[in-house]
Image (cartoon, grey):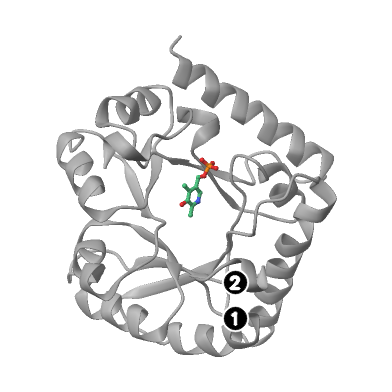
Amino acid sequence: MTAIVSNLQAVHIAIEQALQSAMRGTADVKLLAVSKTFPAPSVREAYEGGQHEFGESYVQEALGKMATLSDLAIVWHYIGPVQSNKTRDIAENFAWVHGVDRLKIAQRLSEQRPTGMPALNICLQVNVSGEASKSGVVPQEVVGLAQEVSKLPNIKLRGLMAIPAPIDDEVAQRKPFAHLRQLSQEIGEQGIVLDTLSMGMSHDFVAAIKEGATIIRIGTAIFGKRDYGENI
Ligand SMILES: *Cc1c(COP(=O)(O)O)cnc(C)c1O
């Protein structure tokens, strides 16, 4: 068994344990493997180990891997910050976008989603850590943004996403995740049905699962430490 496949198995075991301790059903969480900076052969290795959904943060890098791996039935998620000049490539090539925090970006994605493709799945990124993060809509504005985004034709608003400031302690890690879940409930009370909480990374996914995460985004624990210098 390769290192990537054995790491995947270890992550699945940790997910099951966290689900059990949270009294949540098995298979209640989708694992998104974050493959940014790792080359196509690593993605193929994970795919052959049973992992079919991958997250990428850099558009050009992702397009290269998509071309190389076009023989695989991969579901690609864009998880990086969305710049206006990248929306067309994103709308044309990904199934999900996790980092939307402005109406203008959502409008562009909707306009540029090719007809004939299924609606683009969107998560709104919320800044639940205050000063510590630059991206994400502020919590006070997320309900209004969700109302506007949910009206757009070629995208489907699925839920909320957050990247809290890194903390070691699990109790402290849970607070911003609980906040995101609370905001999702507030949006639900406005009649907008959401089914996704995209939260939790290698260092805090157990806390995220205990607060209701439905997608966790794991890179390091599957592929190892990233080397940004050589791979981009
Ligand atoms: C890189 C990245 C991840 C994965 O982080 P790890 O700590 O390596 O698990 C998750 N989410 C986003 C948005 C990322 O950019």
Horizontally, is 8 left or right of 226 in the view? right
Mark number, residue 138: 1
Helix, strand or loop at label 1? It is: loop
The x and y percentages for residue 224 are 48, 28
Helix, strand or loop at label 2? It is: loop
Horizontally, is 186 left or right of 162 in the view? right
User: Real-space Cα distance between discs 1 and 2?
Assistant: 5 Å
Q: Is residue 12 above or below residue 173?
A: above
Q: Quadrant of the C terminus?
A: top left
Q: Residue at x 75, y 32 (%)?
A: 17
Q: Say which of 129 and 218 sits in front.
A: 129
Residue at image mark 2: 127
Horizontally, is 85 left or right of 186 in the view? left
Q: Say which of 206 and 158 sits in front.
A: 206
- Label 1 lies in ligand 1 vicinity (Cβ under 8 Å): no
The x and y percentages for residue 100 are 43, 72
The x and y percentages for residue 73 are 28, 38
Q: Say which of 145 and 36 sits in front.
A: 36
Asked if marks 1 and 2 touch (Cβ < 8 Å), the reply is yes
Crowding at mark 1 (Cα within 10 Å: few <14, some 14-19, many 20+)? some
- Label 2 lies in ligand 1 vicinity (Cβ under 8 Å): no
* Mark nearer the N terminus (1 vs 2): 2
Residue 89 lies in quadrant: bottom left
Q: Residue at x 29, y 56 (%)?
A: 94
Mark number, residue 22: none
Q: Is residue 160 above or below residue 48?
A: below
The x and y percentages for residue 106 are 36, 79
Amino acid residing under circle 1: Val
Q: Residue at x 39, y 58 (%)?
A: 80
Q: Residue at x 69, y 38 (%)?
A: 26
Horizontally, is 169 left or right of 114 in the view? right
Amino acid residing under circle 2: Asn
